[in-house]
Image: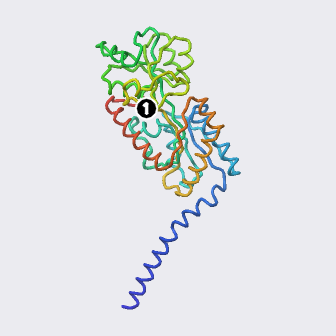
Amino acid sequence: MYRLARNITRTVMSACALLTCMPMVAAHAAQGYPSKPVRIITGTSATFADIVSRQIAAQLYERWGHPVIVENRPGPAQTISTAAAAKAAPDGYTLVMADRSGIAVAPSLFRNLPYEPIKDLAPITLIAKTPLIMIAHSSVSASNLREFIAQVKQFPQGLNYASPGPGTAGNLEGELMKQLTGANLVSVHYKGGGAAMLAILSGEVNFGLMVPLLAIPHLKTGKVKAFAVTSQDRFTGTPDLPTVTEAGFPELRSEYWIGMLAPARTPESIIGKLNADIVDIVRTPAMQSTLTAQAAILAPNSPREFAAFIESETGKWSKVIRTAGLKAE
């Protein structure tokens, strides 16, 4: 009986010692990190996510003294690049620069998606957001968003709007606008934002929601007019343009975004180091200049804040996609 009690005591003490050591082991994981090259997977080259990834990679190399390689894996809605990262070893040597499409939209848009973002990925930090601008052909008589929605409601057959395809930012914002205002907007899909923008310029389609880089140059020519910007605050590139909240429709606020994540179960100490280093880089004047050139808004945060943001975005767009009956083509 005494021997049994002694053995139990030893087992309990060993377990307690192990639990005591676990935080020390976790903290130690980041001390030697990184000790070899790190890769950042992202989608198509020359995109917003790719440009920012390469600048972050270059500055991480300067800090760490180890190569940081950007690997492009093109695919629909960044699902290929995001899936590759979700399946990688959780050791901090594979990261992904993902966007709203691959994280918050794809789970509802694609059947048999090979990953679950909330389950298979560990958020590091949100990087940046960019709003959309609600634009219309110059022939549209409405002078503001409220007038425009009222006009659309007068057409029983609805009004066509240009979008770069199902599940894209322009398409989802259009469906959100339709569902929240009751305006009968009908999506006409084009192959990319450039083609959608040309359709509006020609008058083939009267309305659309475009990223600032596409919309702003044409606003200056007077060929299109703008009603509002979908960001929380006024956008620096269009300071005279009201936000959707100022226009009377706060529920239409939405933004396209990119952020850095790692495979799930990556040690918290490594996630913490990555967050500290990447957030510091994002806040440098050089990175802010890059983001401004891409018509983006600086938005770094903590892993916990990013996780909560992802959950909120996933719920929001899941409802929009389900109501609209959208499916990836």
Compared with residue 109, is residue 24 higher up or lower down, i.e. above or below? Answer: below
Task: Determine the residue located farthest toward the bottom in the rendered image.
Answer: 2
Which kind of residue does numbered mark 1 sit on? Ser
Compared with residue 162, is residue 45 higher up or lower down, i.e. above or below? Answer: below
Q: Which residue is mark 1?
A: 254
Could you tell whether 112 is left or right of 182 in the image? Answer: right
Quarter of the figure with residue 73: top right
Compared with residue 54, is residue 147 higher up or lower down, i.e. above or below? Answer: above
Q: How many numbered marks appear?
A: 1
Q: Residue 278, how many percent across, how many down?
A: 59, 46
Q: Residues within 10 Å of mark 1 (few under 14, many from 20)?
A: many
Quadrant assignment for the C terminus: top left
**As rendered, which of 53 and 248 lies closer to the eye?**
248
Q: Secondary structure at mark 1?
A: loop
**As rendered, which of 238 and 211 lies closer to the eye?**
238
**As rendered, which of 166 and 268 lies closer to the eye?**
268
Could you tell whether 300 is left or right of 69 in the image? Answer: left
Q: Residue 29, how many percent across, how many down?
A: 58, 61
Q: Residue 158, how many percent across, how many down?
A: 33, 15
The residue depicted at 48 percent of the width and 14 percent of the height is 225
The residue depicted at 32 percent of the width and 19 percent of the height is 184
